[in-house]
Image: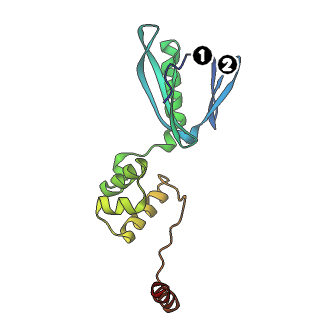
């Protein structure tokens, strides 16, 4: 969490691939496919509540929030444009069943598959089916494949011998 962040004067450019903030000293790009939310909200600036556009995105697997402050008419146009530019990434609650939504929230909280199976009380095969649906909807991606193994006869012999010594 960053505290005491400061406002910086800059230009903003919204392209097909990203939102660029360009100031005198730096350039920052927020790729549109990493934007998780855009909202028109209020923020205290120099002791006054002002309307701002809040942009939430993922950066290096962390959630980052940025605010844009400009004249209200420009702000509304910017908000509408950003909403339109990111509408392809939106998912309505009706597109995901309750159990899949619960699994997605548990993944977001950092739980691994085994813990989710226990928490939701579903089998490994059931969670795999849910993951397949979430992958197909573009809500999750595979980061690691876990293997389940069992001992062969040779493995059982090895373990039996190892315990004797």
Occupied quadrant, residue 47:
top left
User: Residue at 53% across / 59% down in the picture?
Assistant: 142
| 70 up-or-down from 94: above or below | above
Question: Between marks 2 and 1, how big is the CA–CA gap?
Answer: 8 Å
Do the residues under discs 2 and 1 have CB atoms within 8 angstroms? yes
Residue 110 image label: none
The residue furthest right is 25
| Helix, strand or loop under label 1 | loop
- Left/right placement of residue 72 relative to residue 103 reads right
| 79 up-or-down from 135: above or below | above
Residue 73 x/y as whole percent: 49, 14
- Colour scheme shown: rainbow
| 68 up-or-down from 113: above or below | above
Sooner in the amino-acid sequence: mark 2 or mark 1 = 1
Occupied quadrant, residue 42:
top left
Occupied quadrant, residue 103:
bottom left
Residue 88 x/y as whole percent: 51, 43
- Left/right placement of residue 21 relative to residue 106 reads right
Tag 2 residue = 23
User: Residue at 52% across / 56% down in the picture?
Assistant: 141
Residue 8 image label: 1
Residue 157 x/y as whole percent: 49, 91
Q: Nearer the viewer, residue 78 or 69?
A: 69
Residue 152 x/y as whole percent: 50, 88
| Helix, strand or loop under label 2 | loop
Q: Which of 123 and 34 is in front in this view?
A: 123
Crowding at mark 2 (Cα within 10 Å: few <14, some 14-19, many 20+): few
User: Residue at 47% across / 19% down in the picture?
Assistant: 52
């Amino acid at each position: 969490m960053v505290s005491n962040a400061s406002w910086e004067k800059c230009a903003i450019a919204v392209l097909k691939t990203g939102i660029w903030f360009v100031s005198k000293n730096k350039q920052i790009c927020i790729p549109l496919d990493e934007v998780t939310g855009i909202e028109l909200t209020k923020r205290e600036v120099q002791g006054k509540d002002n309307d701002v556009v809040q942009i939430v995105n993922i950066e290096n697997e962390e959630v980052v929030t940025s605010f844009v402050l400009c004249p209200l008419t420009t702000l509304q146009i910017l908000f509408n444009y950003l909403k339109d530019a990111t509408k392809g990434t939106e998912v309505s609650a009706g597109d995901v069943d309750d159990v899949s939504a619960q699994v997605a929230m548990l993944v977001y909280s950092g739980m691994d598959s085994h813990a989710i199976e226990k928490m939701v009380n579903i089998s490994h095969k059931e969670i795999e089916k849910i993951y397949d649906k979430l992958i197909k909807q573009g809500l999750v991606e595979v980061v690691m494949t876990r293997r389940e193994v069992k001992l062969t006869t040779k493995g059982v012999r090895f373990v039996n011998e190892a315990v004797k010594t």
